[in-house]
Image: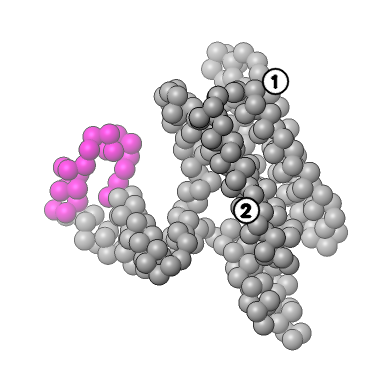
Amino acid sequence: MAGRAAGLMLLAGAAALASGSQGDREPVYRKCVLRCEERNCSGGALRHFRLRQPIYMSLAGWTCWDDCKYECMWVTVGLYLQEGHRVPQFHGKVSLNAWFWSTVFHTRDTDLTEKMDYFCASTVILHSIYLCCVRTVGLQHPAVAAAFRVVLLLLLTAHVSYLSLVHFDYGYNLAANVAIGLVNLVWWLAWCLRNQRQLPHVRKCVGVVLLLQGLSLLELLDFPPLFWVLDAHAIWHISTIPVHILFFSFLKDDSLYLLQESEAKFKLD
């Protein structure tokens, strides 16, 4: 029974990848946002919010609803910590953090924004490797996935510490990201090829990893901007948008498969 319960928890986690983040699905969070919106985002309360809102937030398009979501996020985090649980993810911010800092860096190039852009990019690749570990090994051996997560966090800490405290080496950073990108590519492809007959939807995953690896050449083989507007880096950013839509489609199909497989096993039992 314990093994079955652990399996169900992992399956639920896999399904969550297709439907959002844990924090923003919490009833407490949703009720908090609804009440905040009713209380603060209409009539005189809304006018008061707009009057006291800093100009930079107004220019950035920060709305009363955004403010409610932000405040309720911290309320929910506080409840999680109070109950002894890990902090949940909200609105996919762990992944979107990389895109946020990339936007900030390309808007304002400073030492801080450059480091955040580079470090968050490394985090995204390591997170993809962790997802691969969970899908290929973790469903049967959750302890292995947990240990592997610790290893990845230690690697990320060492990488960031070296670049921040010792020397910001562009060559090393590029080599490190290429290396972990290749690990990500080989691992996902090996699993996909082994399961392509049983799981037809893995073709989407194959397409994703091959496209991302191919598009990464734009980062390595740079060229002058086309029409003095679109350089290789800009084209890489634009090109990766549809790839992530395809990856989401794969995650959705795979999560549905896992849930159906679980239901079939329970019927047999």
Identify whether 35 is placed above or below 202: below
Which quarter of the picture shows residue 214? top right
Of badges 2 and 1, nearer the viewer stands: 2
Q: Which residues are magenta?
A: 44-65
> Residue 118 or 246: which is nearer the viewer?
118
| Amino acid on which disc 1 is placed | Leu
Distance between the alpha carbons at the discs numbered 2 and 1: 32 Å
Tell me the crowding category of disc 2: few under 14, some 14 to 19, or many 20 or more residues within 10 angstroms, Cα based: some
Q: Residue at x 67, y 77 (%)?
A: 4
> Residue 2 or 64: which is nearer the viewer?
2
Give the SS element for disc 1: loop
Q: Which residue is mark 2?
A: 149
In the picture, measured across the screen, residue 50 lies left or right of residue 57, that is left
| Residue 254 point in image, percent of width and height | 69, 60
Tell me the crowding category of disc 1: few under 14, some 14 to 19, or many 20 or more residues within 10 angstroms, Cα based: few
| Residue 54 point in image, percent of width and height | 22, 38
